[in-house]
Amino acid sequence: MFTLAGLVGLFAGLGAYFLNLLIHFFHHIFFEQAASYFSSSLTHKIFLISIPGIGGLMVGLISHFFGKEAKGHGVPSVIEAVANRGGFIRPRVSIVTSVTASTTIGSGGSAGKEGPIVQIGAAIGSTIGQLFGVSSERLKILVGTGAAAGLGAVFNAPITGVLFAIEVILADFSISAFSPIIFATVISTTVSHYLIGTSPAESTAVYYLESFYEYPIYIVMGLAGGVVAVYFTKILYWVEEFFDKLKNVPPYIKPVIGGLLTGVIALYFPYIYGFDDMAVHKSLELIPHSVLILAVLFVLKILATSFSLGSGGSGGLFTPSIFIGATFGAFFGSCANILFPGVTASPTAYALVGMGIIVAGTTHAPITALLLVFEITSDYQVILPLMLGTIIATVTARTIMRESIYTKSLALSGDYIFKGRNLTLLQSLPITQHIQKKYEYIPKEMPFTKILELMKKSDHSTFPVVNKDQQIIGVIALRDLRPYMFENDLYPLLIASDVMREEFLKVTPTQSLADVLRLFDLNDAEMIPVVSRRNSRKIVGVIFKDDLMRWYQKAPLFQKELG
């Protein structure tokens, strides 16, 4: 796995480099070469409006004929591949996505590099895994490895790349997933440093905390940012739904319409162009001049991003979210300065926290958002307000809308993804085939010493306790014995009924796998007894979490059409 992860990291780093080259190439062709042929002011303006539309036509044609996975913001298709297809992604996706994303961004579409490079890296990881015939479980890890390596390389933020893959793509914090992901990300970021450079993705101001009285203000900012994040998500998918309903318009024409709408906005507000890596820094320079413009910019960035991606363009959402967060934070900080002069820091300080708030609110990934801003700023002073704002924004956004900006598209297609699992599919599968009919149990009169011997010999650490009628009356886990294990004098006096838990989880054979997995996640149980539907004391078997998770990781649940 380390050898394969090294290969994934190498090719993901090269993929980030070539993605940058392609973006600069298309930007040079459209905005420097072609635009120079229009001398009059009117024709030049018309051409500037049409550039994103021309890019949209190219993207629409490529996506329509060569790979539909390449359109949109990329990450949902990677999550879907992990949850539904065991990590299988077509090899051509990396090539097609490179071209469509670089065309969208290079022609001025409001999108970022991170979504495409996540998809490109994931496709590289999946392709290498398929070539070497790894298991489905390892293929998923290689997909996450590629996603992390690509994101770390293109953003110059390796820790963010690792956490994004763990928190968003795989939802797996095990060491078996962490190790290859970290190894690949180190290699990809090193390649990126050598080929692209080591400058951070954004140029930002230094953060400082003016007063401890600012913490309540950051809480309010987190609440407001969570609402803005939900607004962004809903607008994006409303625009996508609107274009999907245009049945009489060919699919490859829809990105043209979205591109033209983006071009109109960018003509008057060029900050919203996707190719300008310094857009955040430039927009914050407006703070002394016009607070209102900042409010207009974060609203227009939401609209432009929705037009660019919702119509079928290709690109990421991190960079737009950072821009929206920075302008929202600067606007909020400016208002705080007016209301509470003397106890609030400059609006640029709020802009930095705003970046993390909007990223966390849209992705529902507060750790990723926190580390992203920290790696961008390299300023530890921002950590406490950032931690506070991101978690408040995440909780607020989740309360209003269950899905993140990535899982929303999967939910609309009928798939509810939770912690890397397709709960919609699992809701239709019964637990009957996973019930262990032969299992170890503890009679309620069993002495404490015999229980300890059973624990030593068994492969499991949790057992049902039954009475003389073989009815379940409790559960004993290893952690239930710990309070008594150093009281040797009590050993002869204790029996199973003294140390068992009378309140315990149980399921019936008619319940679904989704129900059982949710119970395991919420209660950290190792085993759940299965009881009769008519008699809750009659035990018919048990389900072990390890057995169920091994089956889920290896089972080809279903294969969607890949053609």
Image: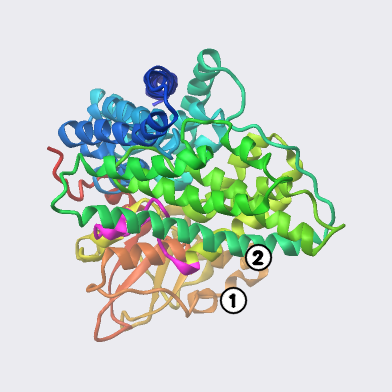
Mark 1, Cα crowd under 10 Å, few <14 / some 14-19 / many 20+, is few
In this view, the residue in front, 364 or 87, is 364
**Taking the image as drawn, is residue 548 in sight?**
no
Instruction: Give the quadrant of residue 62.
Output: top left
In this view, the residue in front, 129 or 242, is 242
Q: Residue furthest right?
A: 342
Residue at horizontal 74 percent and vertical 40 percent from the top: 380
Q: Up-down: is 360 above or below 521?
A: above
* The C terminus - image quarter: top left
The residue beneath circle 1 is: 493
Q: Please state if 509 lies on the left or on the right of 141 as rendered.
A: left
Which coloring applies here? rainbow
Identify the element where label 1 is drawn: helix
Q: Quick check: is 313 in the magenta stretch?
A: no
**Earlier sequence position, callout 1 versus callout 2:** 2
Mark 2, Cα crowd under 10 Å, few <14 / some 14-19 / many 20+, is few
Task: Please provide percent x and percent y for residue 60.
Answer: 23, 36
Q: Up-down: is 168 above or below 217?
A: above
What is the three-letter code of the residue carrying label 1?
Leu
Task: Please provide percent x and percent y for residue 117.
Answer: 40, 31
Which numbered marker is on residue 488? Answer: 2
**Taking the image as drawn, is residue 252 in sight?**
yes
In this view, the residue in front, 207 or 44, is 44
What is the three-letter code of the residue carrying label 2?
Asn
In this view, the residue in front, 323 or 158, is 323
Q: Quick check: is 407 in the magenta stretch?
A: yes
Magenta part of the chain: 399-418
Residue at horizontal 66 percent and vertical 47 percent from the top: 351
